[in-house]
Amino acid sequence: MTSGPAEDRPPRARPDACPGALQVHRAADGGLARIRVPGGVLTAVQLRVLGAAARDLGDGALELTSRGNLQLRGLPPGAERELGGRLAAAGLLPSETHERVRNVLASVLSGRTGGLLDVRPWVSDFDARLCADPELAELPGRYLAAFDDGRGDVAGLGADVGLLGLDDSTVALLLAGVDSGVRTTPDGAVGLALAATRAFHRERAVQGATAWRLVELAEGPVRVAATLGDSTSARVAVAPAPPTGPAGAVPQDDGRTALVAVVPLGRLTAHQAELLADTAVTELQVTPWRSVVVPDLTGAAAAASLSAAGLVLDPASPWLAVTACAGRPGCAKSLADVRGDAARAVATGTLPLRDVRQHWSGCERRCGRPQRDVVDVVATGDGYRIAAT
């Protein structure tokens, strides 16, 4: 396998300081806490707890991230202590030492429709075993695992360690988003992913412990693969991840329905969170495309109430193609209220680009930008310009 462009990247000048639920980042609008949600799976009760925390402790909303995690903004100093207590009581903080490294993506609707394998058991097993290993608490907060059931929705998101179902009995190990040539069975998949994760951690230590991602290590994927046994299988090409996820009503294989609600700009109000929790049968799934799946419904009757609350269930909506950074007032570096401007442009039909995936940014850093096939709309302090990628 090839190791990608790691050799062209300069060493990191500082350690990873990715925020967590307890290690809060101080932003211009207050504290920012990030809650890891492996596989994006939440119970209805847990979503209610998060909505209440956003209302009581933060700015009244939850932010959905491109890793299927959730953020609270606007926290006053010291609020992380109460937040941590609420999360622990809800089962959302199984390990204080590992909470920043529990970044796990999983195929959307796996086990319900599509795919070759059901990866849901992998997520819970991997998370439990990750949290039980003291060594893995030292992973950087940017570490990412992705478990793809064969449909190809999360395999192309460039995770440090990935699993991709090739058929009902064969799983490929991906490293930095590339097939390593290492194969296993579904029963051995979690063990292999953990072994690869430990190998990444150890190789990172050998190379100075400053890298945030596997791709940043010199020959990182090759060196990790070499510790895992036979890697002689014919490589499969990993397709890029789809630019957007599903939206609207999705029929499940069991005859029930999943509603996929896109959250405009990833900002889910406490009211919307409570409505989604009330709609859910037992659980929900947050996706990397800043949407929330409500599965196992007996019909799509709830779609009207979700749409009335500002959630998007139309696959043709321009909201599926528009993302944005935090902008003002949340970021001191931003030159504009990016979210407000983008929302007005969608509402008035005045987007600078039609039918084009676009990311609005408050400055040249372009935080939160999707990985590929996106045009940048960058604030200048005097309007916006369309920027080259």
Image (spheres, rainbow, N blue to C red):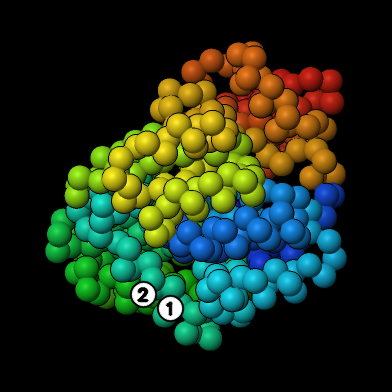
Q: Provide residue 228's location: percent of width, then percent of height.
A: 32, 75
Query: Which residue occupies the foreground of this view, 59 or 39?
Result: 59
* Residue highlighted by disc 2: 125
Which amino acid lies under the numbered mark 1 shown in the image of this protein?
A: Ala
User: Would you say residue 238 is visible in this rendering?
Assistant: no
Query: In this rendering, would 305 be left or right of 366?
Result: left
Q: Secondary structure at mark 1?
A: helix
Q: Provide residue 282's location: percent of width, then percent of height.
A: 39, 60
Q: Residue at x 22, y 58 (%)?
A: 117
Does residue 342 lie above or below 246 as drawn? above
Q: Residue at x 46, y 62 (%)?
A: 43
Quadrant of residue 22 within the rendered picture: bottom right
Q: Residue at x 71, y 41 (%)?
A: 326
Query: Which residue occupies the foreground of this view, 38 or 243?
Result: 38
Query: In this rendering, would 196 be left or right of 206?
Result: left
The answer to whether marks 2 and 1 mark residues whose Cβ atoms lie closer than 8 Å is: yes
Quadrant of residue 162 within the rendered picture: bottom left
Q: CA distance from mark 2 to mark 1?
A: 5 Å
**Quadrant in the picture for the C terminus:** top right
Which amino acid lies under the numbered mark 2 shown in the image of this protein?
A: Asp
Does residue 139 lie above or below 303 as drawn? below
Crowding at dot 1, Cα within 10 Å, few <14 / some 14-19 / many 20+, comes out as some
Query: Which residue occupies the foreground of this view, 197 or 278?
Result: 278
* Residue highlighted by disc 1: 128
Q: Secondary structure at mark 2?
A: helix
Q: Provide residue 255's location: percent of width, then percent of height.
A: 20, 45
